[in-house]
Amino acid sequence: MIQKSLIKMSETPQKKETNLSVQIAGVQFQNPILTASGTFGYGLEYADFIDLNRLGGIIVKGLSIKPSHGNSPPRIVETASGMLNAIGLQNIGVEAFINEKLPLLKKFNTKIIVNFFGDTQDEYVLAAERFNDVTEVAALEMNISCPNVEKGGLAFGTNPEITEELVRKVKKITSLPLIVKLSPNVTDIVVMAKAAANGGADALSIINTLLGMAIDVHSRRPMLANITGGLSGPAIKPVALRMVWQVAKTVNIPIIGIGGIMNAQDALEFIIAGASVVQVGTGNFIDPSISIKILDGINDYCEKNDISNINDLIGTLKV
């Protein structure tokens, strides 16, 4: 009897583990869950809440050449199905990050991506170039939603010619894969995506926040000191999803989906629409462990639907 039962057990097919690893521009992520810049600090702040080693990657708070204090408060307002922020890209600066934060971050088994920005093209170039010899950084994510002080404050990412020029300049000097984070505050996101791709971008992050505002009806004043701010959260998900789908059909570089991802289904929608990996942002403020819950949910979905490789799901929307 014992011998028969052993034979029966050996004949039982073993459950195959889903391969969740995804490669973008030569960077191998152990899974498609990244944390969005500006919502996860420098990563270390969340170490007490989740196992950072389980994340596909951490995209750190946006960095500039010099430290920035950001905007005056109030800087955050909760809205229906989301939030407005006008933090103003407050950060400790590139040098402080490399010397103080990175030595602690590199202890974790996850990819570190540096988000960076500048007020001028030269500042973008200098910030990117500084990371050429920093082996702990896997890739750069360039935020082009910043105002260009050399062009009257017009955001870099709203003009295709300027976008292509800036991407080409940065790509020329960096030794790291370059991800360009696109602004949704444009007439046609596809035009901007093509411009970034033509400039040499290795991947695109879609989308950054939508420009919005809120008013205190009692004082009749803006609720943000900056007047306007970036809208994020579930409210922007349909817009982000549409833009990811549109861009995925027209460029041949990987897409990172961002915008209102609160659960595994949200993340899967972006992947099916054409995103290779996704970023979890505003959800981190609601539930510090949300990224891990989303990862587990994706794994469960793949197992239930007999998907052995997450790459087989990318861009499979049926229309």
Image: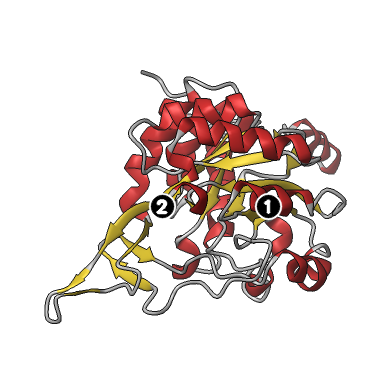
From what the image shows, is residue 64 above or below residue 20? below
For marks 2 and 1, give the CA distance.
20 Å
The disc at residue 209 is: 2
Q: Position of residue 222 (x, y in %)?
A: 24, 72
Q: Position of residue 218 (x, y in %)?
A: 12, 81
What amino acid is found at the position of numbered circle 2 in the picture? Thr
Q: Is residue 127 visible?
A: yes
56 relative to 273 in the view: left or right: right
Which residue is located at x 70 percent, y 47 percent?
125
Q: Position of residue 7 (x, y in %)?
A: 82, 34
Frontmost residue, 301 versus 49: 49
Circle 1 sits on which residue?
Answer: 57
Residue type at mark 1 is Gly
Label 2 or label 1, whichever comes before in sequence order: 1
Dividing the picture into quarters, in which one does residue 27 lie?
Answer: top right
Name above or below for residue 16 compared with residue 128.
above
Secondary element under disc 1, as helix, strand or loop, is strand
Q: Quadrant of the C terminus?
A: top left
Viewer-nearest residue: 207 or 98:
98
The quarter of the picture where residue 298 lies is top right
> What residue do we see at 69% from left, 40% from top?
170
